[in-house]
Amino acid sequence: MTLQYAGTFARQAVRWHRPLMLFAAVNAAFIVIAGIGMVVDHRLIAGSLAWFKPFKFAVSFALYCTTLAWMISLRRKRSRTLWWAATVFVACGVIEQVLAVMQVLRGTRSHFNATTPFNAAVLSALGATILVLFLATVVIAVLLAFQRLDDAPSLWAIRFGLAISLVGMGLAVLMSNQPSGVEGVVGAHTVGAPDGGHGMPFTGWSTAHGDLRIPHFIGLHALQALPLFATALTWLSTRIPLLRNEGARLALICTAAAGYAGIVVLTTWQALRGQSLVRPDGATITAFGVLLGTVIACAAIIVATTGIRRSEE
């Protein structure tokens, strides 16, 4: 039964926005290719394995495109503007991946690299592509935000996820304005030291200094996190009577979105102070504690209030 359901779902997913799903499939395949590249190619670029950036981009694009395609499939009416905006997103993604891989094959970094006229031209092309990709995402977000769904919590999870994701995408501007400390390199991920120091496993985020990739990553993937949370609440509502109240689920979504946005703000603040995620100071720990406590308190109030209302009915 599970295999039959999986097969039905896969056939439906293929019919979602085809360019997005095709690009997601290509990136899923490229995850394997880049993974092999990291194993067999030991060259380092900016302190990381040469194929690490294309690998991360492939993972991100595969997740992002699949999620956007799913969201577009929820619309009751087709929109040519939405279809073209998503297709432009794919075209920009293709250009970005091709340029990143080209620079890996040349043995040099793609982003922030203005060390030669050719590298500067690649950097300009990347900048223009990222700007168009961002604008296409804004169009997609606006059109999806005004769609209608029967389930209000899911709709608001999508709206909040898109909004926070756009903020996360926009945080890349902070990296482009960050001094690199390296001649010809016009931007950096790391705050307080040149890129390429000790990094965390898999992510490569700095373990000694601030790293702006952290809030960028967290913000981007609100697009998956909040709708998944809404889906989990819907599933739990079949088992927990309190969650059958749509208003309660919506309030929990709003609370989760506020908490998630708070994490994006907190990690941005931490990174800009040159502080590693794994070495928080007292101010960061206190801020996180206040944020976590507030989210838990709000969730508890929502559950308690819903319970009281149910008992009075």
Image (spheres, helix red, strand yellow):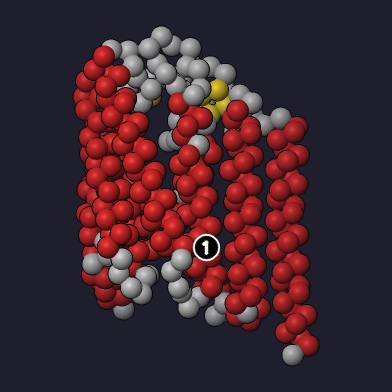
Q: Which residue is at a point 31% across and 26% down the rendered structure image?
A: 124
Q: Position of residue 92 (x, y in %)?
A: 28, 42
In the picture provided, is 183 more to the left or to the right than 124? right
In the picture provided, is 194 more to the left or to the right than 249? left
Q: Quadrant of residue 264?
A: top right
Q: Which residue is at a point 76% across and 86% down the rendered structure image?
A: 311
The correct choice, above or below, for 313 with respect to 296 in the image is: below
Q: Which residue is at a point 36% across and 26% down the rendered structure image?
A: 111
Q: Position of residue 293 (x, y in %)?
A: 75, 52
Q: Residue farthest to the bottom?
A: 313
Q: Three-letter amino acid code at disc 1?
A: Ala
Q: Position of residue 85 (x, y in %)?
A: 31, 53
Q: Which residue is at a point 63% across and 54% down the rendered structure image?
A: 258
Q: Determine the secondary structure under disc 1.
A: helix
Q: How many marks?
A: 1
Q: Residue farthest to the top?
A: 183
Residue 212 showing in the rendered view: yes
The correct choice, above or below, for 144 with respect to 186 in the image is: below
Q: Position of residue 43 (x, y in %)?
A: 29, 20
The correct choice, above or below, for 19 with respect to 251 in the image is: above
Q: Which residue is mark 1?
A: 157
In the picture provided, is 278 more to the left or to the right than 174? right
User: Quarter holding the N terminus?
Assistant: bottom left
Residue 40 showing in the rendered view: no
The correct choice, above or below, for 3 with respect to 55 in the image is: below
Mark 1: give few (<14), some (14-19) or many (20+) Cα within 10 Å: many
Front residue (pair 180, 159): 159
Front residue (pair 139, 244): 139
In the picture provided, is 193 more to the left or to the right than 67? right
